[in-house]
């Protein structure tokens, strides 16, 4: 595809600013722009004109339907399609779309999770147009990004609280920016660039694995003889099927205005990554949802299956999502980038220590934001960051903060006295700040990279926590600095004190080492190992105080989310357990029996003839039959655990039960099955092997 075509293709299926500008009368365009930038109310007559123009544009581009596209608490997106058709009375139809239909929808959403926020008699939820995210056309449907809430206004989705957290951060960061005398700045926004990892395997093999189809991960399987030890996949050249797929996905994403930028092979065989150019947290979240959806549908078109699960293959590198995060002013200044003047640098240092303090004080909430049944397989499992949160700053920046703390000269390259507001800081190029790939929260030159997210996550949750925690710290800073007569002295003291009080969270070493786990314990950092350990922190007093103060979540909204997430954890393991039982009874046991039959028949026929050596058959048969006996025991234990899970318990006890009883029983049974897989003849084994799945896409 030529350069020119990409520029034409990009955003061609988006009702973006350019489309609005050409298709709307000037006064309507200006009114809409004001709503987008300042959140002002959109009058119905204006909405009617916008809706009509949007419909005309959509119909010209092949759309027949529209949908309010929203992000319920299932973690995926939801849509209910309505066509534009309206009967004319003479047997014909016209295509219509009103302002009312654009701005607000009332889906009957009783089957979507609400965590008790909505009783069934008021099953209706409302979807409300989010004007800050452009409408787009997908599969012949005009998709209008919307927020989703209950009859009484509680957020039932992932977008509403994210928008609220961005607003909170804007409000508090503006107070700080104003203190530094930046009068031309009107707003502060969070920029997010999520790097998405995924696996691609052959569709036929995928469909032959019920565990992948039902749960997204393999529940059985022995490691192939070759894993990632040769390090020959990372950044390796793209195989032709993968290359075709990647070209296709790029084009589909570009059409929808998603700035897909980087693509490469990842560490594990069949693992890849896609990263867009960063945008505002809200748009990045919408775009990442679209990306995950398209990865799956485009893969399907190529007879491939895209696996977004955090750990599709045990013993093989899992998939995560790196959330690159920064804050900038609407005038284009990145507040996490050291500036060119001492003044800008003082501002940078203040924002830097704000992040340090926020991450230290709200480590538990950051941990919660990356917790799920799927991600429990990664965090702390020697490839992803551990479950302990710490910050990597790099040597240079740590030195600078240390010398501020000690009041000493900064002994870096430039050997200058570190006086805040007086000293010019060096810039930190990516290559000096990006050396530690084991850190869960790393400073990478002008942004932080939060690396604990699972690949299947909506990035909304982690960004809500980050934005809100940092809002709180900035609020405290602004409260203190607004009162002072001597701004520079107060600022210097605040930076120094904040660093000193929170430097325990900084760790530049290897996060995968056992020594770090011990050291972190000594430093008093929390180590919430599993989802069940982490989630209760979401409804702790501290969490409720934080989120309610900044109007991001009401207490009822937090409690409902706690219920929903814990329930999702239980359901994920429940489905896995049932799938394991099914696969074992329906396919694995019969395969073991068939092979044993064959061995027994052979033994029988050889036994009649004394000249034959029967030791191999007899050894195999006895090994497989004894393992089969073990399998029966483990299967019974798992079935008992599944039955027991039906006992009524509170949600926390229920989740603990799934982790301690059901999950353990699953792991024990898997061990036996995986050993059987190495013994039973390949022709009898009922499922594609790891080796086949990981090495079949050429
Ligand atoms: P790496 O794999 O080395 O971390 P990538 O290029 O794969 O780097 O991804 C970096 C991500 O960070 C991209 O999505 C990029 O757009 C994003 N990014 C770059 N600068 C910023 C910034 N200031 N704020 C937020 N995200 C950013
Ligand atoms: Mg990265």
Image (cartoon, grey):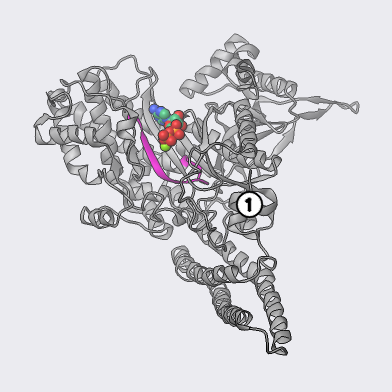
Residue 96 shows up from this direction: yes
Q: Inspect the magenta stretch and tell me whether residue 221 lies in it.
A: no
| Residue at the image point whose x is 69% and y is 74% from the top | 590
| Residue at the image point whose x is 63% and y is 13% from the top | 24
- Give ligand 2's quarter of the image: top left
Q: Nearer the viewer, residue 133 or 692?
A: 692
| Residue at the image point whose x is 25% and y is 20% from the top | 344
Q: Residues within 10 Å of mark 1 (few under 14, many from 20)?
A: few
Task: Locate residue 198: give its quadrant.
Answer: top right
Task: Note whether ligand 1 is within 8 Å of mark 1.
Answer: no
Labels in figure, total: 1
Q: Position of residue 320 (x, y in %)?
A: 47, 45
Q: Position of residue 168 (x, y in %)?
A: 38, 33
Q: Is residue 130 above or below residue 616?
A: above
Q: Is residue 492 above or below residue 561?
A: above
Image quadrant where one finds the C terminus: top right
Q: What segment carries the magenta color?
A: 445-460
Task: Locate residue 418: give its quadrant.
Answer: top left
Residue occupying the far top of the picture: 26
Image quadrant where one finds the N terminus: top right
Q: Nearer the viewer, residue 464 or 338?
A: 338
Q: Is residue 121 above or below residue 141?
A: below
Is label 1 in a helix, a strand or a loop? loop
Q: Is residue 109 above or below residue 489?
A: below
Q: Position of residue 647 (x, y in %)?
A: 53, 73
Residue 190 shows up from this direction: no
Q: Position of residue 232 (x, y in %)?
A: 49, 44
Image position of 297 (left or right of 147): right
Q: In this figure, which residue is indicated by the disc labeled 1?
A: 111
């Amino acid at each position: 595809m030529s350069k020119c075509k990409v520029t034409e293709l990009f955003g061609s299926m988006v009702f973006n600013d350019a489309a609005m500008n050409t298709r709307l009368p000037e006064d309507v365009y200006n009114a809409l722009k004001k709503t987008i930038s300042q959140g002002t109310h959109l009058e119905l007559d204006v909405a009617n004109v916008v809706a009509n123009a949007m419909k005309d544009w959509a119909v010209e581009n092949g759309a027949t339907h529209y949908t309010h596209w929203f992000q319920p608490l299932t973690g995926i997106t939801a849509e209910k399609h309505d066509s534009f058709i309206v009967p004319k009375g003479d047997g014909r139809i016209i295509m219509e779309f009103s302002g009312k239909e654009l701005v607000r929808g009332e889906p009957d959403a009783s089957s979507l999770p609400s965590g008790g926020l909505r009783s069934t008699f008021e099953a209706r939820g409302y979807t409300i147009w989010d004007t800050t995210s452009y409408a787009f056309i997908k599969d012949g449907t005009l998709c209008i990004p919307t927020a989703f809430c209950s009859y009484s206004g509680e957020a039932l989705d992932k977008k509403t609280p994210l928008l609220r957290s961005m607003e909170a951060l804007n409000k508090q960061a503006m107070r700080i920016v104003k203190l530094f005398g930046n009068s031309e700045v009107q707003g502060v926004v969070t920029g997010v660039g999520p790097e998405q990892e995924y696996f691609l395997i052959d569709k036929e093999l995928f469909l032959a694995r019920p565990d992948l189809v039902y749960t997204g991960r393999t529940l059985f399987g022995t490691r192939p003889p070759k894993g990632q030890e040769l390090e020959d996949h990372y950044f390796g050249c793209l195989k032709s099927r993968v290359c075709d797929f990647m070209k296709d996905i790029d084009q589909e994403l570009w059409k929808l205005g998603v700035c897909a930028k980087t693509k490469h092979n990842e560490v594990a065989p069949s693992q890849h990554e896609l990263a867009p150019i960063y945008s505002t947290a809200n748009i990045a979240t919408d775009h990442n949802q679209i990306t995950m959806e398209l990865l799956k549908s485009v893969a399907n078109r190529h007879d491939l299956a895209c696996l977004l699960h955090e750990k599709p293959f045990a013993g093989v590198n899992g998939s995560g999502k790196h959330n690159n995060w920064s804050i900038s002013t609407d005038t284009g200044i990145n507040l996490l980038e050291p500036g060119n003047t001492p003044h800008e640098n003082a501002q940078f240092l203040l924002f830097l220590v704000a992040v340090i303090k926020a991450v230290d004080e709200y480590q538990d909430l950051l941990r919660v934001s990356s917790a799920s049944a799927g991600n429990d397989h990664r965090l702390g499992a020697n490839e992803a960051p551990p479950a302990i949160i710490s910050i990597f700053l790099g040597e240079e920046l740590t030195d600078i903060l240390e010398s501020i703390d000690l009041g000493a000269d900064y002994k870096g390259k430039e050997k200058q006295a570190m006086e805040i507001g007086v000293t010019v800081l060096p810039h930190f190029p990516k290559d000096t700040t990006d050396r530690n790939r084991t850190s869960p929260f790393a400073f990478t030159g002008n942004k932080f990279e939060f690396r604990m997210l699972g690949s299947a996550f909506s990035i909304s949750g982690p960004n809500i926590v980050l934005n809100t925690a940092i809002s709180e710290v900035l609020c405290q800073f602004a409260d203190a600095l607004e009162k002072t007569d001597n701004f520079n002295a107060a600022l210097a003291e605040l930076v120094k004190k904040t660093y000193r009080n929170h430097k325990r969270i900084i760790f530049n070493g290897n996060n995968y080492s056992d020594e770090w786990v011990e050291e972190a314990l000594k430093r008093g950092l929390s180590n919430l190992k599993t989802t069940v350990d982490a989630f209760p922190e979401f409804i702790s007093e501290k969490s409720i105080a934080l989120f309610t103060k900044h109007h991001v979540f009401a207490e009822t909204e937090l409690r409902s989310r706690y219920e929903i997430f814990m329930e999702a954890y239980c359901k994920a393991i429940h489905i896995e357990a049932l799938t394991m039982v099914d696969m074992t009874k329906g396919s694995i046991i019969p395969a073991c029996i068939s092979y044993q039959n064959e061995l027994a028949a052979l033994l029988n026929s050889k036994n009649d003839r004394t000249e034959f050596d029967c030791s191999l058959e007899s050894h195999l048969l006895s090994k497989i039959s004894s393992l089969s006996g073990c399998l029966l025991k483990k299967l019974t234990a798992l079935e008992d655990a599944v039955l027991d899970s039906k006992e009524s318990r509170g949600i926390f006890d229920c989740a603990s039960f799934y982790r301690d009883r059901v999950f353990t029983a699953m792991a024990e049974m898997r061990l036996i099955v995986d050993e059987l897989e190495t013994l039973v003849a390949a022709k009898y084994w009922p499922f594609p092997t790891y080796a086949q799945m990981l090495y079949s896409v050429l």
